Image (cartoon, helix red, strand yellow):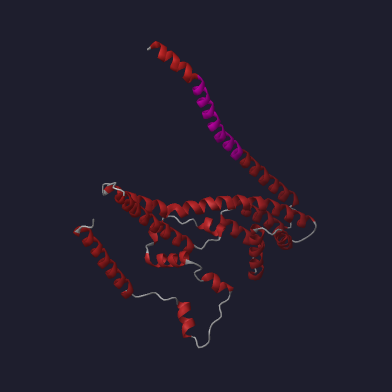
Amino acid sequence: MTTGLQLAIAGGGLVGLGVAGLIWRLVPAHPDLGDALDRLSPTPVRRGPADAVAAPADTREWLGQWAMKTLPAGAWARVPHQELALLRTPVTRFYGEKVLFAVVGLIVPPFLITFFRVIGLQLPWVIPVVATLGLAVLMFFLPDYNARDDAKRARDEFNRALGAYIDLVALERNSGSGARQAMEVAAQVGDSWVFRRLSEELTRSRWSGEAPWEAIRTLGHDLGVAELEDLADILRLSGEEGTQIYAQLRARSASMRSAMLTSELSKANEIGERMSIPMSLLGVIFMGLLIAPALLRVMGGGS
């Protein structure tokens, strides 16, 4: 049954929402310069692919742009720039996901508390407040965990493909190709996202006049892939000093495969150890089922 207090709370909430909407409407907006120039231009401006990428693709990017303009920089804590660069996730989308997840964390607990009150379960006011704030903070940092976890898997995949790429570069160099030609031809062999990323970076370095090994070094630094920086050092010796690097490249790819094999074996051992725990519990339960009847008989006879 609705009471006067509940009606007053609902009315106050509606009034506060209306005042907030009015203030939001009266606050000076920050128009997008590109959109404003397009509207003022006498002829319609055709957007190219670069403009289509720069424009907000979904609600998350729009929300991220708003958050970057509104919220202070210290509210984001540490932004995983290398992980986002590896995943090719715009920073605005990452910010938008954090804000969106935090809003979901603020909304879910009140709905649950309302459901509990409907079924007759009354909770102290401290529990809803703590649950709402705690879930909002947890959801706010959830995109950080997702980005690091996805980037870890992507970095492992990158290293596996990079081992094959180094072998291809070594074969091209052994056949007499130059450093840039060997790197570009090897990058065009594969069709995975790793080879496409390398090919794009090498093409960019060609048009900008940058040395290809410097482009690879910059890419490795931006993505947090140390193996790319090592490859850049080896290729720099070949390009600037004419050093024969076939043996070095093959040794580098072999060491990478050995390290990946060791990592996979350690992961397999960890999974095997985790799988042994349920089997041990099943053995304990089976032994308990065998011993329980005898114990019950002895206890019954003793009483």
Q: Is residue 202 left or right of residue 148?
A: right
For the N terminus, which image quadrant? bottom left
Q: Nearer the viewer, residue 205 or 72?
A: 72
Q: Is residue 263 left or right of residue 166?
A: left
Q: Residue at x 63, y 61 (%)?
A: 197
Provide residue 42's location: percent of width, then percent of height: 50, 88
Query: Which residue is the extreme one toward the top?
Result: 302
Q: Is residue 277 magenta?
A: yes
Whether residue 103 appears in this view of the structure is yes
Query: Which residue is the extreme one toward the bottom?
Result: 42
For the C terminus, which image quadrant? top left
Provide residue 144's location: percent of width, then percent of height: 47, 53
Q: Is residue 155 left or right of residue 2?
A: right
Total tally of numbered discs in the picture: 0
Query: Which residue is the extreme one toward the left?
Result: 4
Q: Residue at x 44, y 62 (%)?
A: 96
Which segment is the magenta one?
Answer: 266-290
Q: Residue at x 41, y 76 (%)?
A: 31
Magenta-drawn stretch, dominant element (helix, strand or loop):
helix
Q: Quadrant of residue 231?
A: bottom right
